Image: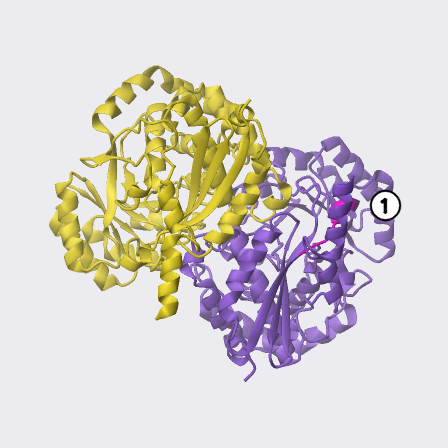
Chain colours: A yellow, B purple
């Protein structure tokens, strides 16, 4: 009976602010970071997971994840991964920690980090990539892992099982299809706000050459700049490909409506994060006002209850759930099931550190076992920081190749963790020394 | 020019779980705790503030508050308290920390703790109780401190100023009235779930004898128990006083409706926290189904955007904002102003550690400067832990007496902080030793 011996949580930060990678109207200088969890066992098996942050505060998240993980140390591995619903509920049920949310902010991110590592452990133990582990579970088994609390007004256990059951006979057909085509993705790498017009134009041309059918631009800092940048993008990608725009929450509701209308001539497929991620009714108002431009949000969607309301209020056209902000598969499955019921396509948020590695599993799972559809579905891809992962995602011709190695693709190279551990890793120790020396 | 020299943040925990004080259907064993902030200056002035938690996780909150407070150290005191809107926006605008919310969870609680101390500092510097500092600000000054981001679809700066302006001529009348009567409150001390029937009956009788017109019971663990307990309460308080019930979020929406209907015979004034605090549309559904029983929520209301939607969706009859979960006066004023506009009475959440000390200031401010009404307004009071504060609230005949000393009444006795600091204070060090010895 192997046991969990240690769980290490490391504050890992990459100095992305230096190159303006990831810059947008709200987040001008993020240092893409991970609260990185490594579960070690005495049986040789290990599990890795993380949540994603953008720098300061990652120490707070790291402490929270350490506390969340403590009850797992010393426990029997088979018991922990044998009932992933019970493990999740155990960790989540700490009523003292619950007060700090519930189900939101640092404590929820920390739970996501820990449970992502537990799911990685489970998939490795099964010798399967995470998407395959999920697909192979019976509907009952899968729904038993899902957090359905506060959802029974829109989704019962029985409905969830029935939806999954319906898709089972055709799983293998869709897997075979994805093995041929991959899962379609779009690139955000072209359109960061800090890039010059020349760089934007060059990256758009490169994206087209690489086979992308969707390109996303950051907007929201200056309307004239946005008009010029959208024009450049359209010149490069033409009108047969999709352009999406992303405001990263900088607007109030009336301003969002006005600004998006001023960009309507560029026919964006969606406006992403037009306002506060908490504002269900605000998104519904924006959606009504800017149609046929779609409304997308979700990377800051704090939990399943928020998404439930987004669906109930018909507030969004695209659900961009985040694999490291929702509390891992246990909560993500619930959102996918609700999205299916309400007919809203899920286009997961990715980028950051390792989010692409995670969401490729989610998208495959969705197509194979939940939605059965690729219509209006495209998963984000950002081409940076993959070199730090032992099983990096592979994108070809605008599509994610199916991950094939056991696990959730969440493991980072030990050398990367050591180099970028904050503040004592080699990179930061040196940099701090250099800054101090100036 | 006095400067801020140090900001100490202490993890203070009281062992309330031992006596089941504070027990309810969701929170069975809270150790009422404070993330306690002390701002020291080289001019002799100090400021104290906190956020409230219930035990584990308070260390995470403490670290977050330390990080939030760092930019204030070394700054000129007059500058910090001379523009309380700018100080709040500066602290809040850290875009890296924002990612961990935004405006919710641990990071937001930490901001609340720090800004509560800044407001205490400002009130002490002015030689006024906090409520008086607020009342004496011009409408423009006050609104300039308020966080109106994401609210312009329901409240503009101009509307806010006009609402406050309208109340100014009659401020002193209402102050004189409150100096006579105090501000009405209700007691939760009688109805904790962990108390026996005998204790419940005795405490209800005592509450009546003490002059309370409102009594609140915890419900939601077992329906038969709830029926019996409500009956006992009604036997003791009669039908001319108000009974409120509080489920602390244990129900899904359909279950909430069913359960509350089963208790309708006891004619509760409100059902508090029937379901997830994030579920705006859920609360609206419950409210519609259980009328004329009112719906109350807010102690876990994470930010002003949530309250905006609660008002827009006509989801609540009573707004129970929390003085240590919203990011201090800067966000609280925004919620009071929206509540006024939508005609929803604010009955602040209190209890915990020191929340009564804070909310007495808020309620006085509301009556004098915002709502001008006591109709359907009653502020929570829980009679424990006041002995740890240097300026404890005083409740007589079911009403808070007006606080008169300078500040926000947030300072704890140094001896209490030292005794209950976790894990190294005398109480915990001893207790840990005792537990280890068993």
Residue A382: where, in percent of width, then height? 27, 45
Q: Is residue B116 visible?
A: yes
Q: Quadrant of the N terminus of chain B?
A: bottom right
On the rendered structure, is A19 left or right of B114? left
Residue B217 lies in quadrant: top right
- Residue B298 versus residue A247: which sits nearer the camera? A247
Residue B13: say if magenta.
Answer: yes
Residue A74: where, in percent of width, then height? 59, 32
On the rendered structure, is A170 left or right of B429? left
- Magenta residues span B12-18
Which residue position is annotated with label 1?
A: B236
State the residue at coordinates (29%, 42%). Answer: A387
Q: Is residue B198 above or below residue B181?
A: above
Q: Quadrant of the C terminus of chain B?
A: top right
Residue A107: say if magenta.
Answer: no
Residue A265: where, in percent of width, then height? 19, 53
State the residue at coordinates (25%, 37%). Answer: A185
Residue B40 lies in quadrant: bottom right
Residue A117: where, in percent of width, then height? 46, 35
Q: Callout 1: 10 Å neighbours few (<14), some, many (20+)? A: some
């Amino acid at each position: 009976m192997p046991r969990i011996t240690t769980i290490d949580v490391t504050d890992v930060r990459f100095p992305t602010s230096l190159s303006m990678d990831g810059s947008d109207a709200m987040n001008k200088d993020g240092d893409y970071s991970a609260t990185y969890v490594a579960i070690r066992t005495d049986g040789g098996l290990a599990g890795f997971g993380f949540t994603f942050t953008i720098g300061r505060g990652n120490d707070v998240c790291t402490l929270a994840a350490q506390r969340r993980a403590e009850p797992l140390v010393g426990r029997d591995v088979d018991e922990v991964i044998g009932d992933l619903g019970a493990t999740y509920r155990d960790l989540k049920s700490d009523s003292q920690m619950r007060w700090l949310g519930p189900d939101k902010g640092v404590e929820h991110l920390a739970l996501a980090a820990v449970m992502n590592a537990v799911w990685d452990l489970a998939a490795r133990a099964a010798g399967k990539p995470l998407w395959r582990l999920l697909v192979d579970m019976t509907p009952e088994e899968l729904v038993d892992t899902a957090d359905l609390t506060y959802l029974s007004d829109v989704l019962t256990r029985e409905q969830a099982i029935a939806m999954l059951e319906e898709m089972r006979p055709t799983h293998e057909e869709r897997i075979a299809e994805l093995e041929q085509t991959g899962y379609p993705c779009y690139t955000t790498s072209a359109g960061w706000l800090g890039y010059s017009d020349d760089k934007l134009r060059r990256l758009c041309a490169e994206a087209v050459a690489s086979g992308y059918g969707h390109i996303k631009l950051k907007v929201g800092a200056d309307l004239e700049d946005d008009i010029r940048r959208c024009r450049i993008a359209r010149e490069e990608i033409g009108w047969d490909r999709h352009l999406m725009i992303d405001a990263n929450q900088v607007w109030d509701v009336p301003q969002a409506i006005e600004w998006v209308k001023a960009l309507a001539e560029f026919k964006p497929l969606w406006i992403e994060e037009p306002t506060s991620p908490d504002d269900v009714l605000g998104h519904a108002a924006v959606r009504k006002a800017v149609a046929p431009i779609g409304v997308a949000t979700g990377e800051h969607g704090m939990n399943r209850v928020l998404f439930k309301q987004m669906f109930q209020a018909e507030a969004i056209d695209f659900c961009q759930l985040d694999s490291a902000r929702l509390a891992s598969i246990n909560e993500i499955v619930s959102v996918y099931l609700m999205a299916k019921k309400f007919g809203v396509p899920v286009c997961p948020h990715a980028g950051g550190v390792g989010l692409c590695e995670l969401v490729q599993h989610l998208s495959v799972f969705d197509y194979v076992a939940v939605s059965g559809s690729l219509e209006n579905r495209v998963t984000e891809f950002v081409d940076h920081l993959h070199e730090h992962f032992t099983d990096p995602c592979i994108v070809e011709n605008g599509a994610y190749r199916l991950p094939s190695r056991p696990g959730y693709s969440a493991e980072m190279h030990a050398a990367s963790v050591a180099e970028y551990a904050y503040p004592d890793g080699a990179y930061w120790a040196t940099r701090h020394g250099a800054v101090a020396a100036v």
